[in-house]
Image (tube, rainbow, N blue to C red):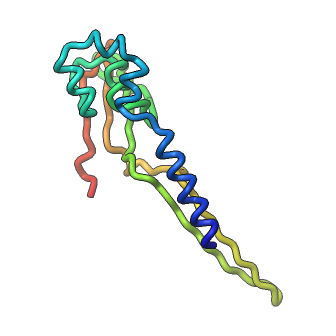
């Protein structure tokens, strides 16, 4: 069990190291970043987004969304990007069972896995290629 836990923790560290940071996203798109006004560049560096940002600006600041979907509004369709809490998600399980004199033991570790909607921390709404709304989940603990 101890080696299984160590393996899971090692995998989590590798996955965390592989995640793109704001700096790496800027470097990957340096020419585009340099074309933005200074105040927008600063907001992107700090992971902040504002109404009026383009999808490229949001991706550079926050990365790829966890989910995207379309919302119907009075003005038409809006594209919504949903971002989850970026805390690591680890689940451990242990089971014991018996039948007819035999006993079985099993265990499991899940890193990442399915997330519930309560992990959503932010929604970014786009209409006509620009951010029109930034909705933050303030009910988080």
In the displayed structure, does residue 2 sit left or right of residue 135?
Answer: right
Return the residue nearer the eye: 26 or 102: 26
Image coords of residue 54 (percent x, y): 31, 17
Residue appearing at x 52%, y 62% in the figure: 91
In the displayed structure, does residue 106 sit left or right of residue 6?
Answer: right
Return the residue nearer the eye: 12 or 127: 12
Image coords of residue 137 (percent x, y): 27, 45
Give residue 122's quadrant in the image.
top left
The total of numbered circles placed on residues is: 0
Image coords of residue 64 (percent x, y): 43, 30
In the displayed structure, does residue 140 sit left or right of residue 103?
Answer: left
Residue appearing at x 32%, y 12% in the figure: 128
Give residue 38's quadrant in the image.
top left
Q: Residue furthest left?
A: 39
Image coords of residue 73 (percent x, y): 31, 23
Q: Is residue 49 above or below residue 30?
A: below
Q: Is residue 22 above or below residue 54?
A: below
Which image quadrant: the C terminus? bottom left
Residue appearing at x 16%, y 20% in the figure: 39
Which image quadrant: the N terminus? bottom right
Return the residue nearer the eye: 113 or 4: 4
Residue appearing at x 35%, y 12% in the figure: 32
In the displayed structure, does residue 110 sit left or right of residue 140?
Answer: right
Q: Residue furthest bottom?
A: 101
């Amino acid at each position: 069990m101890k080696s299984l836990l160590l393996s899971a923790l090692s995998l989590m560290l590798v996955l965390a190291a592989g995640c793109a940071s704001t700096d790496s996203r800027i470097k990957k798109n340096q020419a585009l970043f340099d074309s933005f006004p200074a105040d927008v560049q600063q907001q992107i560096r700090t992971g902040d987004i504002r109404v009026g940002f383009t999808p490229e600006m949001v991706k550079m600041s926050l990365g790829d969304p966890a989910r995207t979907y379309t919302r119907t509004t009075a003005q038409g369709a809006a594209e919504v990007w949903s971002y989850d809490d970026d805390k690591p998600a680890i689940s451990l399980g242990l089971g014991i069972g018996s039948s007819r004199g035999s006993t079985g033991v099993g265990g499991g570790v899940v890193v990442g896995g399915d997330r519930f909607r309560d992990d959503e921390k932010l929604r970014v709404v786009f209409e006509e290629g620009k951010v029109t709304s930034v909705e933050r989940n303030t009910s988080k603990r």
